Image (spheres, helix red, strand yellow):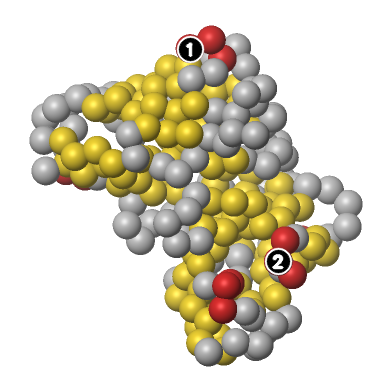
Amino acid sequence: AQSVTQLGSHVSVSEGALVLLRCNYSSSVPPYLFWYVQYPNQGLQLLLKYTTGATLVKGINGFEAEFKKSETSFHLTKPSAHMSDAAEYFCAVSLNTGNQFYFGTGTSLTVIP
Amino acid sequence: GAGVSQSPSNKVTEKGKDVELRCDPISGHTALYWYRQSLGQGLEFLIYFQGNSAPDKSGLPSDRFSAERTGGSVSTLTIQRTQQEDSAVYLCASSLGPLSYEQYFGPGTRLTVT
């Protein structure tokens, strides 16, 4: 069975500090990997995705993530947190052997001024 | 252009009643997904439509749940004989294609079963 694990349901960082949101997946085949963000009272929107090619992918708002096959991880980072980054972040996996997307339970990011 | 829209935005219903939730995907998007988001939970896959293919219903939690997609566009999720555990936000998403393509999410329908 496939699964997505996001370590830490709540993460707090100071404004200007590094943001690190963790995502690990289990998959027996190469996955497609996504990070989505949900701002308060808004729908989910794509931050970035990995399908093939370069394992370090850059997304919107200064976020990036690196696919590490050996660690089955796709952690999301941003060098310097901004107040506007406060939101819920979801990691998702899809497999080319099926139709489903598997989402993690989400990580709520709080940015402290 | 217009994004994914869902209606109603909020629905309160009594236990045992049937409800219909509507999703209007982005024009030209062949793939459509329904998810359920319960408090403190991630998104739970419900059903997937791709073009004219038979839908993938493997995520539907019970036979009280059904969905259809008419003309490859608008989709309706129906929950019969609602139960309190059905209370959640129901999200619809569409994409140009499956799997590697970005999903565009609607704002969701918040369902409360009393």
Q: Can residue A26 be seen in this view?
A: no
Q: Which of the 4 image quarters holds residue B62?
A: top left
Near-viewer residue (A86 or A89): A86
Q: At 35% from the left edge and 22% from the top edge, which residue is drawn?
A: B66
Q: Is residue A50 left or right of residue A14?
A: right
Q: Are the residues at dot 1 and dot 2 in contact (C-beta closer than 8 Å)?
A: no
Q: At 67% from the left edge and 22% from the top edge, which residue is drawn?
A: B28
Q: In this view, does B29 lie above or below B34?
A: above
Q: At 39% from the left edge and 27% from the top edge, which residue is drawn?
A: B22
The answer for how far apart the CA atoms under marks 1 and 2 are is 37 Å
Q: Residue furthest front?
A: B1
Near-viewer residue (B69 or A111): A111
Q: Which of the 4 image quarters holds residue B46?
A: top left
Q: Which residue is labeled 2 in the image?
A: A61
Q: Does dot 2 land on a helix, a strand or a loop? A: helix
Q: Which amino acid does label 1 sit on?
A: Thr
Q: Which amino acid does label 2 sit on?
A: Asn
Task: Using a 10 Å C-alpha cutoff, classify the residue at mark 2 as few (fewer than 14 neighbours), some (14 to 19) or many (20 or more).
Answer: few
The subunit letter for the residue under badge 1 reads: B
Task: Using a 10 Å C-alpha cutoff, classify the residue at mark 1 as few (fewer than 14 neighbours), some (14 to 19) or many (20 or more).
Answer: few
Q: Which residue is labeled 1 in the image?
A: B70
